[in-house]
Amino acid sequence: MLAISYVNDLLSTGVTPDNNALVALSKSLAYEGGYSTPDYPLFVDALGVTDIRPVHLFVEPDEYLDKTYPTGNDVEQAKRNDEFIRVIEEPWTTKQFPQWAEAIQNQNEALDSVVQATRLPRYFHPLISGNDDTSESLMDALLPLAHTIRRAARALSVRAMNRLGEIDQSRQRINRLERGHD
């Protein structure tokens, strides 16, 4: 049996469009322009659906900022890149980074849908060999949504770090109030 077909058969056992988190994720993580790759028909066929109609338009926070608040020069872009590292790796508040908070708030509905999709019992991302179906080698397998899912994970990390920062700030306020300092 050919490698890609074998792996897909093995991993898709018991998976349906209703219990596969990837189908729900596909609807939550559509981007501008949708899925217009040549392998799209093979992908939706392997998922067992006829089409994926996106429910939300997903824009990663740094892309949102680039569109909404373009940087004027390399120094400003370097500052934004440094901010991205901070907001993804450590707790932060809306007051510290209001534009990042806006970017995450803009994506809350899509990110909430991603969280809901993760609660489904199965996850099957079919391997496809491309539009011409000439290779069944695992080395040639395409994973059309792998990058998109990584992007969503980064956005969820940014949102989580913001929520942690807001909780920490609230806890500090409560402590100051209890000591009579606010």
Image (cartoon, rainbow, N blue to C red):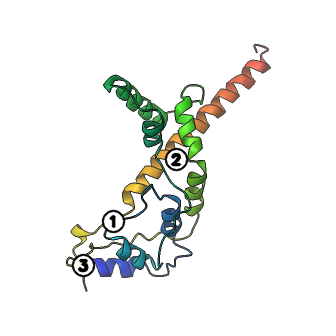
Q: Position of residue 2 (x, y in %)?
A: 24, 82
Residue drawn at x 48%, y 37% as measured from the top left: 68
- Kindly state the secondary structure of the residue where label 3 is placed: loop
* Relative to 114, 143 lies left or right: left
* Mark earlier in primary sequence (1, 3): 1
Position above or below: 8 against 78: below
Disc 2: CA contacts within 10 A as few (<14), some (14-19) or many (>=20): many
* Mark earlier in primary sequence (2, 3): 3
Residue 133's label in the rendered image is 3
Residue drawn at x 44%, y 71% as measured from the top left: 124
- Kindly state the secondary structure of the residue where label 1 is placed: loop
Q: Gap between marks 2 and 3, in whole Å?
A: 35 Å
Foreground pick, 55 / 87: 55
Say if mark 1 contacts mark 2, CB within 8 Å.
no
Position above or below: 37 against 94: below
Q: Position of residue 51 (x, y in %)?
A: 47, 74
Kind of residue at badge 1? Thr
Judging by the rendered image, the residue that carries numbered circle 1 is 37
Disc 1: CA contacts within 10 A as few (<14), some (14-19) or many (>=20): few
Say if mark 1 contacts mark 3, CB within 8 Å.
no
Quarter containing the N terminus: bottom left
Residue drawn at x 73%, y 18% as measured from the top left: 176
Kind of residue at badge 2? Leu
Residue 156's label in the rendered image is 2
- Kindly state the secondary structure of the residue where label 2 is placed: helix
- For the residues carrying marks 2 and 3, which lies nearer the camera in this image? 3
